[in-house]
Amino acid sequence: MKFICAKLQVEALNQKTMKTINSNFINGQFIPSSGKEILGIYNPANGKQIGGVLLGEEQDLLKAIESASNAQAKFSFSTKAERMEYLQCLHDAVMERIGDLQEVTVQEYGATWQRSLWSNKYAAETFLYFREILKDFQFESKIGQSSISMVPVGVTAIMTAWNANSGSICVKLAAAIAAGCTVVIKPNELSAIQSHVLAECFQKAALPEGVINMVHGRGDVLGTILSSHPAIGKILFTGSTLVGKKSSQKMQ
């Protein structure tokens, strides 16, 4: 009986109007993509198209990097208390949309209802995990006669693979926010619907403009720029060993 009910729920979701993601989240706003290619998004459980994404291009990503760079100057001086509050706001915003995230995860991944609920709750909880770490974290310490200060490395690029989309994005984002770094997120383009809902959560969390940016697009186009742009101080990614080697070579 449970299997039949779950199947009917998925079929009902697939009957909804297809959604096309045609904007990127830059400087606190959703800005129309300048791209021309629309990539279809399909439910892997049944092969049916559920939407599409207008892929961003170089100019979209450069706007996001500029936005993050401008915000970094001030955000790097944010206090521990401020960052803890930002992390709490991010958690609350994601939890507020947990039902929507669960729904699109079922559609976009073909995941079960139980798995999609767990994975998105895990994504939200990562913000609380890093908030807890910040409570007693010391950014300044002494070793002998030397003083050590831990400072933000700068704009952080976040690139994620198709699987575990919400968790993969949020755990990297939470670490960056805790450290005082602004971010540019390039999620896998086949997870665009989930990523867009997350971006709406980030907007609702109301962090300073430019702290969080997200651009949809192909890895061979946007990933190459993120791996070599001089404004990027750190790369956090989930992917293959080959991609990691290429990224590290371009940053050297």
Image (spheres, helix red, strand yellow):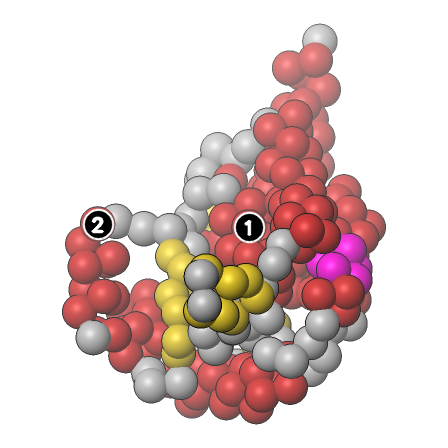
Local secondary structure at mark 1: helix
Which mark identifies residue 238?
none
Question: Of marks 2 and 1, which one's residue comes earlier in the chain?
Answer: 1
Residue 212 at x, y percent in the picture: 61, 72
Give the residue type that dot 1 points to: Val
Q: Hey, which residue is sitting farthest front in the picture?
A: 145
Q: Give the residue at mark 2.
A: 241
> Does residue 147 appear to the left or right of 252 in the view shown?
right
- For image coordinates 67% across by 16% down, the residue present is 4
Local secondary structure at mark 2: helix
Where, quadrant-wise, is the N terminus in this rendering?
Answer: top right
Q: Is residue 252 visible?
A: yes
**Is residue 252 in the magenta section?**
no
> Does residue 31 appear to the left or right of 219 in the view shown?
right
Residue 202 versus residue 124 in the image, above or below: below
Query: Disc 2 to disc 1, how far (Cα)?
Result: 20 Å
Residue 66 at x, y percent in the picture: 50, 89
> Does residue 93 appear to the left or right of 106 in the view shown?
right
Depth check: give the residue in front, 233 or 149. 149
**Dominant SS type (magenta):** helix
Crowdedness of circle 1 by 10 Å Cα count: few (<14), some, many (20+)?
some
Residue 156 versus residue 113 in the image, above or below: below
Residue 156 at x, y percent in the picture: 46, 71
The quarter of the displayed image where residue 233 is located: bottom left
Q: Give the residue at mark 1.
A: 171
Query: Which contiguous range is marked in magenta?
Result: 84-90
Give the residue type that dot 2 points to: Thr
Where, quadrant-wise, is the C terminus in this rendering?
Answer: bottom left
